[in-house]
Image (cartoon, grey):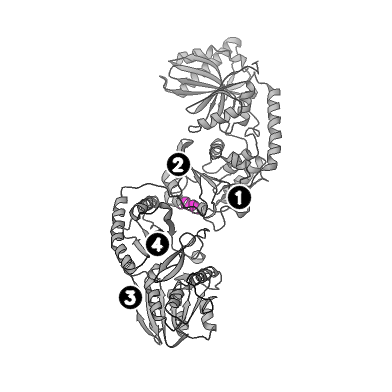
Amino acid sequence: MMNIDATRDFFATVPKGIEDLLADELTQLGALSVKPITAGVAFCGTLETAYRVCLWSRLASRVLMPVSNFIATDPDQLYAASNGFPWEDHFSVDQTFAVEATLVGSKLNHSHYAALRVKDGVVDRFRDRGGDRPSIDTHNPDLRINMHLRGRRGTLSLDLSGESLHRRGYRQEKGVAPLKESLAAAVLLQSGWQKIAADGGPFCDPMCGSGTLPLEAAMIAADMAPGLLRERFGFMAWIGHDDPLWQRLHQEATSRRAIGLQHLPKIIGFDADPLMIRNALINAELCGLEKVVHFEKRSIQSKERLLPESFGRPGLVAVNPPYGERLGQRKELYTVYRSLGERLLAEGGGWRATVLTSDSELGNAIGLKPHSNSELFNGAIPCRLLQFDVPLESEPIPISGALSAGAEMFANRLRKNLKRLGRWAKRQSISCYRLYDADMPEYSVAIDLYGDAVHVQEYAPPDSIDPVDAHARLQDVLAVIPDILSIPPEKVFLKLRLRQRGKEQYQRQAQTGAFFEVEEEGARLLVNLTDYLDTGLFLDHRPVRRLIKQQAAGKRFLNLFAYTATASVQAALGGAISTTSVDMSYTYLGWGKRNFELNGMSPDRHRLIQGDCLEWMTATKERFDLIFLDPPTFSNSKRMEESFDIQRDHVPLVLAASRLLADGGILIFSTNKRRFKLDTEALSGLKIKEITKQTFDEDFARRPQIHSCFWITR
C-alpha cells in the first residue's frame, strides 16, 4: 500500500485555454510544484492532495498518477513497458480495466492500436503469473490505465478520477448543445464569480439551457465540492486506496456544503424553451439546489426585465448563447446577441457580463467593448470568452469594433455632407440638423447633430442583408464619426430604429435621464439622446415650427398630439396670446413643461393637458386661431380602447380639429406616414393646400417622403 504521507507526482488534464486557471485552483487545494503545460497541469502532493483534487477541482477532467516511465519507438516496446510493470500491486485479476492512449509527436500514429498493445502487455503479465487474466470493460471499468507517449518518452499512469471529473453526477437532463460542467466553472471562475458571490452579488443566465451555469454558480457560492454527488471515482477500486482518508475528506465537504447553503446570493436562470426549463429544474433537484436556484421560462427578447429589480445590486450575468454550428442560423443569432447587449445596457449598469461564443462577429453584435477576450475550447470548438463591465447609466457607452475596407467610402461621403450642410447650417444659425440619412444603402443609418453631440439611428437591415455584415458596417460608422466630426466617442449615441408596432411605439429605451439643452430659432429646448426612440425634437419639422412661429402673433394656438410641446414654445415666442398642448403621455407633457420653464414662460398662459386628443376635441367648446395637428402614424397606447392608424383614421381627426377653428383660423396638418394619401373627397368641405415642399430645409431635401403637410382652412 502507498504511504499516504509520501509526496509524489500527479498530472491533471484540462481543456486547452484554462491551464493557468487550473494551476491556481490546484495551488489553493494544497498542490506543490504546480506547472501548467498544454492541456494539463503537473503537480506534486500526497495521496490526500490527489483525493482533494478529485473531490474539489471544478476544472480538471482527470487526475493521473504516473507509475512508470519508459522509452518506446515501436509497438513491441510499448508491450514490453506495460508487461514489465507490476500491475498486480494495483488491481486484481478479478477486476476489469481499460486503457486509453494519447500520442504526441511519436512515430506511432494510431492511438487505438497503441492502447491495444499496452492492454496485451497487462493481460499477459497476469496470465503469466497465475493463469487467469482480468477482463476488459471500455465503458465502466474498475480501473483505467492511461498511456501517454510524447516523442519516444512514455508514461503509464493510473487514472484516479475514473469517469471524467466534469461529470458531477447531477446532470441527467441535457440540452441540445450542453456546456460541460468544468467549462461552465471555468467561465465563472475567470469572471470573478467567487468574489462577487462572497460579496452578496446575484447571478443571472438569460439563456440557461439545462441550467449548467446557474447550478455551477450555486455550487461555487455554496462552497459545495463538485465531486460530492459522485458515487464512484477511479481510486476506489485501486488496491492502494485509503478509504478512511477518503471518508474524512467527504465528511468535511458535506459539512462545508451545509454551511455554504445558508449564505447563497440570488441565482436565476431563464430560457425561452419550456423543455430546457424542465430539464434545469430536474438537474437542480438532483444536486439538491432546487430551493436556492430559480429557473423560469423567459425569452431574452421578452418585455419583462432581464435583471429583476429584486436583485437590488449589481452582480454577474454569464451566458453561453447558441453558436450557430449546431443551433440556429446566424441571422437569427445576430438578433439574439444584439438583444442581449441592449438589455444589458438598459438594465445592467454596474454589472459584470460574461459571454462564451465561437463567433467573434456575433460577439461584436452585443455592442459593448470587452475588457477581456480570451480563448477557451468547448469540446473541439474554439471559443472566445468575452468579459464586459456594463457601464453605469451616467457613463458613455463604449463601442466595439474597428474600421473595415468600406469605411473610407463612408468617411468621404460624411466629409462631403459636412462641408455642404455645415455651411448652410452656419448661415441659418441652425445647431441641430440631419447630416446623413442612408445616403449609401450599405450604410443604412441616420446621423443627426445636436450641438456638439451626435445621434445615430441604425435602420433595421432588410432580410437580404446579412445582419453580421450590417453590424460590421455600423462599427465603421461609429469609428469614423468621431474623427470626421472632431468629437469624442462618448458624444456619439446609438439607437436601433426598427419598425415600431403596437405598444412598442413609445417604449422607453433606457433610464439615464440625460437631458441637455439645444437652441432652435431662438427657443431653448431639451433633448434626450439615450432614453427614448425619438429625442424630443423632430428635426424634419423645423420649418413647420418656424411657420407656426411666424403665424402665431396675437393668436390662440392649439397643439394636438403635442409630444414635448416644442411647437407650442415656438408659438409662444412668436407672440401667441395663449397655447394649449394636448397629449396622451404624462412623460412628454412633463418634458414640455420643462421646455416652457427653460424659456421663462408662465404656465398660466400655456396649458398642458393630458388626454386622448379626439375625445378632448369632441368635449371642448373652445375655439382657436391656429392649430397644429401632428398625430402619430400608428398608436396602440394602453390608454386607448382601440388602435389608431393615420391613413385609416385621418378624416374624422381632421374634421374634428377643423371644427375648433375660429373664423379665419388656420389648421396645419402634418403626418410622417410614408406614401400618405389625403382623402380630399371626404374633406371636400374644407379648403386644403398641400405645403409639403415648403416644409423641408436643406438637410431633409433628399428625403421628401419623410412627411406630408397641409394648410387647411374652413
- Front residue of 124/156: it is 156
**Which of the marked residues, 1 or 3, is nearer the chain's N terminus?**
1
SS at badge 1? loop
What is the spatial separation of the Cα atoms under label 1 and label 4, in whole angstroms? 35 Å
Q: Residue 671: horizontal and vertical position, in percent?
A: 41, 73
The secondary structure type at the circle numbered 3 is helix
Quadrant assignment for the N terminus:
top right
Q: Are marks 1 and 4 in contact (CB under 8 Å)?
A: no
**Badge number at residue 358:** 2
- Crowding near the residue tagged with mark 1, few <14, some 14–19, many ≥20 C-alpha atoms within 10 Å: some
Q: Name which residue type carries label 2.
A: Ser
Mark 3 → mark 4, Cα distance in angstroms: 25 Å
- In front of the other: label 2 or label 4? 4
Say which residue label 3 marks.
694
Residue 339 forms part of the magenta stretch: yes
Which residue lies at the image location 54% right of the left edge and 29% below the top edge?
23
Q: Earlier in the sequence, mark 2 or mark 3?
A: 2
On the image, which quarter does residue 215 sit in? top right
